[in-house]
């Protein structure tokens, strides 16, 4: 692949990433999580809603970090292009096929070494699964319980009148020997 075609691909990739970044930045609130939780506290906000909001915000921020990393990769690829090493695998100096460079313009490795590098990265970084992230988000949301209105203060569970949504999901403690609610 010639230098001009490679530069066009890298510039197009940079512009695509910048456009995605601008779109994400426009969706993120500009206040901190604590400020947004305090603002929402005047509403009848459930703790799970706060946790979900915090989880979504953290997910968006991690996507922004990934985009920034990809932008650095594009800048590094442009530097390699200027040095004359663009299109060579950093591990074995083999030529990277043009179709791979078209698909992933900022790639540093041939397909074999890219696979090895990704496996190495996966082995050295802690696995974070969605369930664990949701637990953390729920714990963070629970830290803001003081912001939620305490409508049930002074009522026992037996005195409390449940709405239709709460009745559908509410689990009660049956009296000893009584069959559980169905």
Image: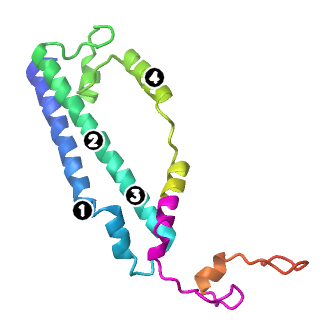
Residue 6 in picture, x, y percent from top left: 15, 24
Residue 89 magenta: no
Query: How far across and down, in percent of the image, does residue 122 sit?
Result: 47, 29
Which of disc 4 and disc 3 is earlier in sequence? 3
Task: Give percent across and percent down for residue 14.
Answer: 17, 37
Which numbered marker is on residue 56? 3
> Is there a contact, CB below 8 Å, between mark 1 and mark 2?
no
**Segment colored magenta:** 138-162
Looking at the image, which residue is at 20% across and 42% down? 16
In primary-sequence order, the first of circles 1 and 4 is 1
Q: Main secondary structure of the magenta part?
A: loop
Residue 43 picture quarter: bottom left
Q: Is residue 22 left or right of residue 179?
A: left
For label 1, count other residues whose C-alpha is less than 10 Å away and answer few (under 14), some (14-19) or many (20+): few
In what element is the residue under mark 3? helix
Density class for disc 3 (Cα within 10 Å; few <14, some 14-19, many ≥20) is some
- Calculate the distance from the C-alpha at mark 3 to the C-alpha at mark 4: 28 Å
Distance CA(mark 4)–CA(mark 2): 21 Å
Question: Is residue 144 positioned above or below 110 on the image?
Answer: below
Q: Is disc 2 surrounded by few (<14), some (14 to 19) or many (20+) residues within 10 Å?
A: some
Q: Between disc 3 and disc 1, whose residue precedes?
A: 1
Instruction: Give the labeled residue for mark 2.
Output: 67
* Contact, mark 4 vs mark 2 (Cβ under 8 Å): no
In the image, residue 123 lies at what x, y percent? 50, 26
Residue indicated by mark 4 = 120
3D distance between C-alphas at marks 3 and 2: 17 Å
Please tell me whether residue 14 is drawn above or below residue 174 in the rendered image.
above
Depth check: 156 or 97 in front?
Answer: 156
Element marked by disc 1: loop
């Amino acid at each position: 692949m010639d230098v001009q075609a490679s530069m066009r691909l890298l510039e197009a990739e940079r512009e695509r990433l910048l456009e995605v970044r601008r779109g994400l930045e426009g969706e993120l609130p500009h206040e901190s999580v604590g400020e947004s939780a305090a603002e929402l506290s005047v509403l009848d906000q459930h703790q799970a809603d706060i946790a979900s909001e915090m989880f979504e915000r953290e997910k968006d921020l991690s996507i922004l970090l990934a985009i920034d990393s990809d932008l650095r990769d594009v800048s590094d690829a442009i530097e390699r292009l200027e040095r004359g090493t663009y299109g060579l695998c950093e591990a074995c100096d083999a030529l990277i096929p043009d179709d791979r460079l078209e698909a992933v313009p900022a790639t540093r490795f041939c397909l074999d070494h890219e696979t090895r590098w990704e496996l190495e990265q996966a082995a050295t970084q802690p696995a974070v699964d969605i369930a664990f992230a949701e637990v953390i988000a729920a714990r963070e949301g629970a830290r803001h319980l003081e912001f939620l209105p305490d409508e049930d203060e002074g009522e026992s569970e037996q005195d409390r009148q449940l709405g239709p949504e709460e009745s559908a999901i509410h689990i009660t403690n049956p009296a000893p020997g009584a069959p559980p609610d169905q």
